Image: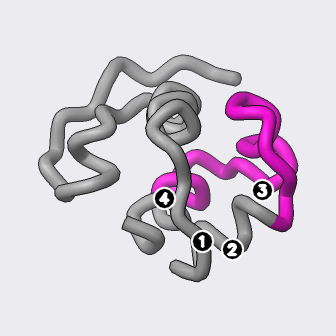
Amino acid sequence: MANRIMSLRLSKNLSREKLAEKPNISVQFLADIEKGGKNMIVTTLRKLSEALFVTTDYIVNGKKLHLPFRKM
């Protein structure tokens, strides 16, 4: 899960700062999530998936169901 979040963020050329805005989390918390050191609540997972234009199922299980890309 952590690797998918980081890979998606990098593939969309998003900084941690920019991605952290949508779910309203700190940059440090996002970094901890990407390193696998922190878990998140469902609301944060949903907001991250929206910001990355993928389903929550993709983040959690790796099932490739991408949503249409929109620029942040």
Q: Amino acid under label 1? A: Lys
Q: Amino acid under label 3? A: Arg
Q: Residues within 10 Å of mark 3 (few under 14, many from 20)?
A: some
Looking at marks 2 and 1 on the same chain, the residue that comes earlier in the sequence is marked by: 2
Q: Give the mark toward the camera: 3 or 1.
A: 1
Q: Position of residue 36 (x, y in %)?
A: 52, 79
Q: Residues within 10 Å of mark 2 (few under 14, many from 20)?
A: some
Residue pointed to by mark 2: 32
Q: Are marks 2 and 1 in contact (CB under 8 Å)?
A: yes
Indicate which disc residue 38 carries.
Answer: 1
Looking at marks 3 and 2 on the same chain, the residue that comes earlier in the sequence is marked by: 3
SS for callout 2: helix
Q: Residues within 10 Å of mark 1 (few under 14, many from 20)?
A: few
For the residues labelled 3 and 4, the Cα–Cα distance comes to 11 Å
SS for callout 3: helix
Q: Are marks 3 and 1 in contact (CB under 8 Å)?
A: no
Taking 29 as reference, is 20 above or below it?
Answer: above
Q: Amino acid under label 4? A: Ile
Q: Are marks 4 and 1 in contact (CB under 8 Å)?
A: no
For the residues labelled 3 and 2, the Cα–Cα distance comes to 11 Å
Q: Residue at x 46, y 31 (%)?
A: 46
Q: Position of residue 33 (x, y in %)?
A: 60, 67
| Residue 12 is a magenta residue | yes
SS for callout 1: loop
Residue pointed to by mark 3: 16
Considering depth in this image, is 59 or 52 the residue closer to the camera? 59
Taking 45 as reference, is 34 above or below it?
Answer: below
